[in-house]
Amino acid sequence: MITKMRVAGFKAWKDTGEFRLAPITVFFGKNSSGKTSLLQFLLMLKQTAESADRHQTFQTRVSGTPIDLGSWTDIVHRHEQDAQLEFRLEWTLPKDVSAKDPDGGTSLTGNGCGFEASVGLVNGAGRPQVGAMQYDLLYDSRKLLSVGMQRSSSTQKRGYELWATGYDLRRRVGRPFSTPPGPLRFYGFPEEASAKYQNAGFALDLVLALEQQLRRVHCLGPLRAHPEREYRWSAEAPPDVGWEGESAVAALLAAAGRKLNHPRKPRRPFQEHIASWLSDVGLLHSFQTHRVAADQDLYLVRVQLTNGSPEVSLPDVGFGVSQVLPVAVQALYCEPHSTVILEQPEIHLHPTVQAGLADLFVGAIGMREDSADRSVQFIIESHSPHFLYRVQRRVAEEILDPANVAIYYCEMTADGARLRPIPVDLFGNITEWPEGFFDAQVDDIVETAKAGLRRKREARE
């Protein structure tokens, strides 16, 4: 789970400052206030880690994905070509990582990692390059050691230097080494750097930890694929439901053998959890998948809107079911320790269902599978007050620990986007409402009351 983040010099953001990410993190704000840019930044890192090109610092364009960020000048703050892009992430580890000196020296074990880097053009030209990067091995957020690379400041050396603090690197003897080249992508140590030191093997474990964390990031966009009458599934398990939810039914079928449980609910098959939630928010009464024939890979999704009504196909029910189904499936389908990014999951949904989405995520962060916590995380961009009010209610009811939620308001200023935390106290109260937060709704309520009073006065006169 990603626990902290800072981004400086990316698109609308001059500097976010370091901010906390919780199991449920929600960004609110007006259009073009920088919310989506924060999500895009994480997705850019993910698609870079998954790219086959190890020499491209950032992959800003990948066919088949909605993350087309353009050129270097398109992604840096104010489009200033000589600007620096800096960032830092911290995350918890599913399994501890150790830095053990093979010769019996330092031995440290951490349950978290940090990574930071600065990237820019060299002399204002060419492709962006890493100026410096650093990994931290953490234990309960306390730094145990750091290892990194930085561009050599020596005019005699044109390359990078490997360094470490809290751990003594020892050079191999008897072999000449040139100055190592730059990092691979934005985060990888080149072979020459680790080969130069006989006890630097742990650095590759930190690189792997970052790659694994980024590959556990999944995204579902705001516009989802239209439902179909038949779905083809060849028994393969997709990595997620897809950018538009196009693989939601395939994921649903692939998860048929999985059973999940929540402390407040019994252990049930995957599909039963989905059907139960859809029923709880009033979208339908029952939900089933059927194979067309034993010798075919075609499947039907049949739903019953009310008790006693006939079963119908997804295209024959309201648009809301097909829009929310990928959200519900992704929330429970992703592998443990995933970070799920959701852009406006409430689009095209009734306010009751928008509020129900909060319950879906609250339940999902507490789900267990195979007797282990799933430890999933949701980073959500939203415009829904109904979603927020349900979160506040669950905190007040002690169903949701306020430590498990982080709410932010993004707003645009003359100096770029600004991030404002919106604290929720133990009783679900928000005492620091920023100006502009759900303004239209409050204005309409006030103006409606004023108009009603004016008309009553006029009627009496």
Image (cartoon, helix red, strand yellow):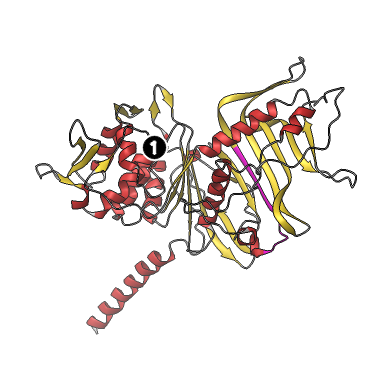
- Residue at 52%, 48% in the rendered image: 423
- Is residue 184 shown to the viewer in this render? yes
Q: State whether residue 430 is above or below residue 303.
A: below
Q: Is residue 86 magenta?
A: yes
Nearer to us in this view, 176 or 32:
176
Q: Is residue 457 left or right of residue 411?
A: left
User: Which quarter shows the C terminus?
Assistant: bottom left
Residue 109 x, y percent position in the rendering? 65, 23
Q: Give the amino acid at mark 1.
A: Pro
- Residue at 74%, 19% in the rendered image: 101
Secondary structure of the residue carrying numbered label 1: loop
Residue 32 x, y percent position in the rendering? 51, 64
Q: Quadrant of residue 267?
A: top left
Q: Is residue 423 left or right of residue 298?
A: right
Q: Which residue is mark 1?
A: 238
Q: Is residue 130 left or right of residue 234?
A: right
Nearer to us in this view, 184 or 352:
184
Q: Quadrant of residue 114?
A: top right
